[in-house]
Image: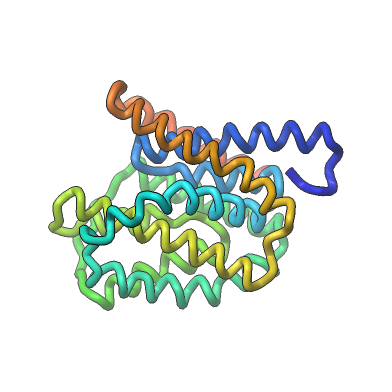
Amino acid sequence: MGGQMGGEIIDITLVIGVFVALFSAGMTAYAGFGGALVMVPAFALMIGPVQAVALTAICSAIALTHVMPGLLRTIRWREVLPLFAGLFLSISVASSFLVKADPDLIRMIMGGFILAAAAILIINPKYAGPRGPKTSLGVGLLTGTIMGGVGVPAGPVMVLYFLAAEESPPVQRANIMFSVWLLLILMLVNLLVRGAINSDTALNALIIAPASILGAYVGKWLFKRAPVTWFKSFAHGLLIIIGLSLLVV
């Protein structure tokens, strides 16, 4: 997937990238979590952490954009807007570390965070703390710092926060999906402003993005026909393997 590789290698890694995107999008649509946690580190092993974040942000943002208009009336803006402010501030600052740091160091930190995210998903803790604009701002700052600084999709942080709200499932879903979309867009804009996205990544995104869209539809189709319980165990194990791989490769 990199411009400096030979033609045969480019073809092989691009094919792998398509399948990673297909699986990751299907995982999110089917199990409701974890797709980007698989996509970013898998790409990081192939093309480096910065380009992996960029490629994931482009593909995932495209896959989610068509859903956004239907969510706007359902979103609880009093919680999402302060969170957006936190994301904006923290990503704008933290992304400078991501683009300048040694890729091997970022991969190691990313591996540790992936393992931590897997633990959070396995334990499935419940947030019972305060809510309000200041708390939403804090959640945004924490999420953006993790995503912006080391490239790890910190969606589980926002998910825990929004699922604890006394809201209907459609409102919770709208808050989560819109906030994740904002996170991806902000990350993408910051990488573009910093000139961190190379032309090969942009070209690969055009090829891989349709796989993300297709994977989302496949995941929705499977959700109606097969139980999710077994898949969650598989996904948790997969995240642990990916996290360990980033630490040792």
Residue at image position (67%, 58%) is 105
Residue 163 x/y as whole percent: 23, 53
**In what quadrant of the picture does the N terminus appear?**
top right
Image quadrant in which you'd find residue 217: top left
**How many numbered circles are shown?**
0
Quadrant of the rendered image containing residue 167: bottom left
Where residue 131 sits, quadrant-wise, is bottom left
Q: Residue at x 77, y 38 (%)?
A: 10
- Whether residue 23 is situated above or below residue 87 in the rendered picture: above
Q: Position of residue 151 (x, y in %)?
A: 56, 58
Is 247 on the left or on the right of 228, as rendered? right
Q: Position of residue 57 (x, y in %)?
A: 54, 55
Residue 182, percent from left and from top = 42, 63
Please tell me which residue lies in front, 218 or 50: 218
Q: Residue furthest top?
A: 225
In-image side of 15 versus 143 (left or right): right
Q: Is residue 140 above or below residue 155?
A: below
Q: Residue at x 31, y 29 (%)?
A: 223
- The C terminus is located in which quarter? top right
Coloration mode: rainbow
Taking depth in this image into account, of 112 and 97 the one nearest to the observer is 97
Q: Residue at x 18, y 48 (%)?
A: 169
| Residue 243 visible | no
Task: Determine if residue 139 is in view.
Answer: yes
**Would you place residue 214 above or below residue 81 in this image?**
above
